[in-house]
């Protein structure tokens, strides 16, 4: 059998088994050494291919595809630094528990460590940031080798999904020539089903463990249910039922999937970040116990509450074994399906304090009234822009926010609504890189998506715009341009006037109309609220991408936010100290 026939069958069997295992999409970054994988993926009759020239952008785009579809997505690149450019997205995928299957082409063994071009050490190059690594054997086409290729494809899928999902890495050494022959018979398989998808059940506590948990919780009267970032929309109804039965407030992170949708929301406290900003208010809200579902919330005031009252019984519910508790509290980890646990606990309520929930509901109403008071606001602040986006964005749409200020403004101004808005953010490592590309991956689902991003984060990933333009993806990009890193103006570093601008403010002084022109995209500079609302609606009524720029001043933004927080603090303390609480 010739080298080309061997190469074609070996890679073809792997690719087909990957598809049979459930991989439906692949993001390819062109290169020479990856020719066998790229061409076989493209030739496969069922695999959806996306071509992204920039490997860094490609990896984040695949991350967005996997986030939205909740299925593993494959990545293909050539050897050398191409593979190294995957690293930022690999780290994000690992910590945010998103399944990716990294397929890196490599030089054959005889060309490694001898000074051959485009040859670096790719063995376990992602270290502990992948769940599994495997160096594939050189292509052979005997039955055992073809079965091996199929098995590794199936195993890659299994490893990516087993327990907490995450990225896996397979490295493929290829010898030249590299071009497959598509006229070869049986290039995909020998006719048999190459891979059977793994089956996964739901874990649950037995009745005795549930009872012990109930007894622990019943030792206190003031409890909090906290739902951090998580992507299971079905959890909302189960958590609400638990909270209603136990008469507990639910502190719902903006990425919890609890703030929007048709489920009941009387127990949802969406303004808890504002409520807890005041140390004086936190002092009056010491909980006896906390039950947390999902990852650690975005809110820093909630973190302060946990640090100040470490004596509270703290329970963290995880679907699979893991450790997400950054405060150092004495924590009871419960590894069980969250919905199953909510249902088990919901029927065991007794002895809970009614007034505790009522108090939180009053505080939530007070904070919301302060935050939504924009009757005299005609200028665009960053918080007002977020409110207007949430008002104008269509039903059944996505909103993707960048880190730093956009996610915090989403936390403050994403109020409970029956309109279904799916929120997204890269909160695995909270970075500002790759945000445009990840949002485009989410938008590839076909659902209208709005990206809210700061100017620095937009600058970091403008390369991602090319893929969005090439594929005609529908994405409204709102660039909040405060000419630098706005979040640092809220931090102690802002007092270091001598070096603040160079090291923290970091102004770009870029005209983003030129960026839109470079990628031939529609652009609007919105100078007031009406112009902004009009630009949003225009973008939602058209296909493709649209960049809307909102220019703000960092110092004015700090003053506006702090004024809101001070108003809320005064009214909350008045309520708590008036004897009505």
Image (spheres, helix red, strand yellow):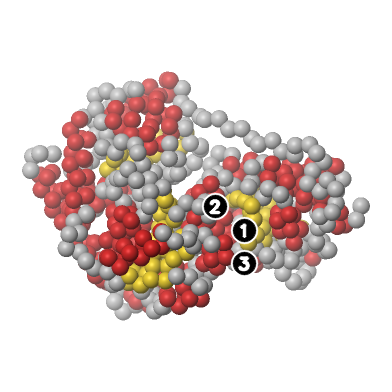
- The residue wearing badge 3 is 53
Q: Which residue is mark 1?
A: 50
Mark carried by residue 490: none
Q: Residue at x 28, y 30 (%)?
A: 244
Residue 370 point in image, percent of width and height: 18, 53
Specify whether 342 is left or right of 271: right
Q: CA distance from mark 3 to mark 1?
A: 10 Å
Q: Position of residue 80 (x, y in %)?
A: 68, 66
Q: Report which residue position mark 2 lands on.
A: 65
Residue sitting nearer the eye, 291 or 98: 98
Residue 511, image quadrant: bottom left
Look at the picture and state if 499 lies above or below 428.
below
Q: Earlier in the sequence, mark 2 or mark 1?
A: 1
- Considering only vertical position in the picture, is 44 above or below 197? below
Question: In the picture provided, is 566 more to the left or to the right than 135?
Answer: left
Label 1 SS = strand
- The residue located at (87%, 57%) in the rendering is 3
């Amino acid at each position: 059998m010739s080298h080309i026939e061997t190469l074609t069958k070996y890679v073809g069997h792997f690719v087909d088994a990957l598809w049979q295992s459930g991989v439906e999409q692949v993001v390819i970054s062109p290169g020479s050494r990856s020719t066998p994988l790229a061409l076989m993926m493209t030739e496969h009759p069922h695999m959806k291919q996306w071509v992204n020239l920039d490997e860094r952008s490609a990896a984040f785009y695949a991350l967005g595809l996997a986030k939205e579809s909740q299925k593993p997505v494959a990545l293909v690149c050539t050897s050398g630094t191409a593979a190294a450019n995957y690293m930022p997205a690999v780290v994000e995928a690992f910590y945010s528990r998103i399944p990716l299957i990294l397929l890196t082409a490599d030089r054959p063994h005889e060309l490694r460590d001898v000074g051959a071009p485009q040859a670096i050490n790719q063995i376990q190059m992602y270290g502990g940031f992948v769940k599994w690594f495997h160096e594939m054997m050189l292509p052979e086409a005997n039955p055992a080798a073809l079965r091996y290729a199929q098995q590794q494809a199936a195993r890659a899928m299994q490893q990516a999904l087993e327990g907490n999902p995450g990225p896996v890495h397979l490295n493929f050494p290829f010898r030249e020539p590299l071009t497959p022959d598509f006229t070869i018979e049986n290039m995909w398989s020998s006719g048999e089903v190459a891979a059977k998808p793994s089956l996964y059940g739901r874990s649950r506590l037995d009745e005795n463990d549930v009872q012990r948990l109930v007894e622990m919780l019943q030792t206190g009267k003031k409890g909090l249910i906290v739902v951090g970032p998580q992507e299971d929309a079905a959890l909302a109804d189960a958590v609400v039922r638990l909270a209603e039965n136990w008469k507990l407030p639910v502190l719902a992170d903006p990425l919890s999937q609890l703030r929007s949708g048709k489920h009941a929301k009387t127990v949802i406290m969406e303004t808890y970040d504002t409520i807890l900003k005041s140390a004086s208010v936190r002092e009056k809200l010491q909980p006896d116990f906390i039950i947390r579902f999902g990852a650690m919330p975005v809110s820093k005031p909630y973190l302060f509450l946990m640090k100040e009252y470490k004596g509270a019984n703290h329970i963290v519910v995880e679907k699979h074994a893991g450790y997400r508790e950054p405060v150092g509290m004495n924590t009871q980890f419960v590894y069980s399906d969250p919905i199953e646990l909510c249902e088990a606990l919901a029927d065991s309520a007794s002895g809970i304090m009614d007034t505790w929930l009522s108090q939180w509901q009053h505080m939530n109403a007070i904070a919301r009234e302060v935050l939504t008071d924009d009757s005299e606001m005609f200028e665009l602040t960053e918080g007002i822009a977020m409110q207007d986006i949430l008002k104008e964005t269509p039903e059944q749409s996505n909103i993707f926010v960048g880190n730093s200020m956009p996610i915090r403004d989403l936390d403050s101004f994403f109020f409970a609504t029956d309109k279904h808005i799916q929120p997204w953010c890269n909160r695995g490592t909270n970075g500002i890189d790759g945000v445009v590309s990840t949002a485009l991956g989410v938008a590839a689902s076909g659902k209208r998506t709005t990206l809210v991003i700061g100017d620095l984060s937009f600058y970091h990933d403008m390369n991602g715009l090319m893929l969005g333009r090439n594929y005609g993806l529908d994405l409204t990009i709102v660039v909040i341009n405060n000419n630098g890193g706005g979040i640092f103006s809220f931090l102690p570093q802002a007092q270091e006037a001598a070096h603040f601008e160079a090291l923290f403010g970091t102004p770009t002084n870029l005209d983003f109309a030129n960026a839109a022109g470079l990628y031939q995209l529609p652009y609007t500079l919105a100078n007031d609220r009406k112009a902004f609302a009009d630009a949003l609606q225009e973008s939602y009524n058209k296909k493709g991408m649209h960049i809307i720029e909102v220019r703000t001043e960092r110092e004015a933004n700090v003053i506006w936010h702090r004024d809101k927080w001070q108003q809320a603090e005064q009214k909350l303390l008045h309520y708590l100290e008036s004897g009505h609480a």
